[in-house]
Amino acid sequence: MGKASAPGKIILSGEHSVVYGYPALVSAVSLRCFAYASSLPEPGIEIISKDLEVRQIYSPTEVYQLKDLPLNSKTDNLAFSALKTLEKIGINPLKQGISISLESEIPISAGLGSSAASAVSVVGAILSLFKKSLSSNEISSLAFEGEILAHGTPSGVDNAAATYGGYLRYENGNVSKLDIANEVPVLVCNTMVPRETKALVANVRKRYDSSPNIIGQILKALGQIPNAMIDSIAKQDFIALGNLMEINQGLLDSIGVGHHAIHKVISIAKEFGALGSKLTGAGGGGCVIILPSDEDSENEIHRALKEQGFDSFRTRFSQEGVRIE
Ligand code: MEV
């Protein structure tokens, strides 16, 4: 049996603008997705996901056709990354069958990178099963092949975060791991409004195509925030960081990826002393990250959100990316 796991992530800044080539600042979190791979007697790729409640068997021909067909199962992208991984390590998918089963601690469709963490852990579990190794860059690229099927025009930031772990600055496929010693103490609140990254990215593209000058300027402004945030984190200037989060949220609202549930969470957090809050991931629902002013404010925000039916938790930062066992 092959086994691997990969972390989810929070985007501190850069969602959407990263798709247009601007930088993003991300942090891997301690919630992980686990994948287990075993050989099958017949050729084919089986994907079993407890969390998605899907069990799907693809014949080799079906997997080869996935790229040209509309996605009809949430596991198509994982089967495709599995196929590409087998090919990459010199195993003929027409002769060798595999089964991969996944279990995840990362909430689905919430902006915490569950899809990319699943893809990276699938690649890792196959490497573990066949006792092969690849570079981090190769693992991330194989996961990205499936992400393209699932998300249309993803930037690659999610699979990079799941592969490398830690705090990352990501820009156009270039990953720099940042030397941030002190964790940024953010609270994550899940609005429980599910959303689809693909549709949100496509909507931003539509707005951009219809008003390129205006949306182009907003994306450019969004693209300045990650570097400013890295600066404020290095100086431990959380007031500046909170301000940047607020600016970031305003700009994301103006490209149409806000939601009234996000605004509700943000206003509760503000009332109880948050220095700043913003959506994380594709938006349109999903999770909000909140920077409390101190421990008391964190407890107050957590309590106030709970009273309004919102669950929140403190993320733990994860230095570890993909783990192949
Ligand atoms: C999704 O986690 C982040 C987006 O920027 C999409 C992407 O980067 O592919 C919205």
Image (cartoon, rainbow, N blue to C red):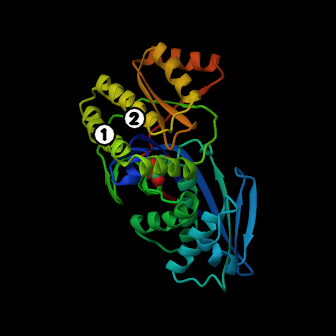
* Residue at image coords 49%, 63%: 144
**Residue 163: image x %, image y %?**
45, 57
Q: Is the CB atom of the residue marked by disc 1 within 8 angstroms of ligand 1's nearest atom?
A: no
Quarter of the figure that contains the N terminus: bottom right
Left or right relative to 95: residue 6 = left
Which disc number belongs to residue 251?
A: 2
Q: Is residue 202 above or below residue 4?
A: above
Disc number placed over residue 254 in the picture, else none? none
Residue sitting at x 30%, y 47%: 178
Up/down of 1 relative to 321, above or below: below
Which residue type carries mark 1? Ala
Residue 65 drawn at (x, y percent): 64, 76
Q: Is residue 279 above or below residue 142?
A: above
Direction front: furthest residue:
210
Q: Residue at x 29, y 26 (%)?
A: 240
Within 8 Å: ligand 1 and the Cβ of disc 2? no
Few, some or many residues within 10 Å of mark 2 (<14, 14–19, 20+): some
Q: Secondary structure at mark 2?
A: helix
Q: Label 2 sits on what residue type? A: Leu
Q: Is there CB contact under 8 Å for labels 2 and 1?
A: yes
Q: Quadrant of the C terminus?
A: bottom right
Residue 325 in sight here: no
Q: Please give left or right for residue 301 compared with residue 273 in the image.
A: right
Residue 48 position in % (x across, y down): 72, 61
Residue 135 visible in image? yes
Q: Which residue is mark 1?
A: 221
Q: Nearer the viewer, residue 308 or 200?
A: 200
Q: Position of residue 123 (x, y in %)?
A: 54, 66
Q: CA distance from mark 2 to mark 1?
A: 8 Å
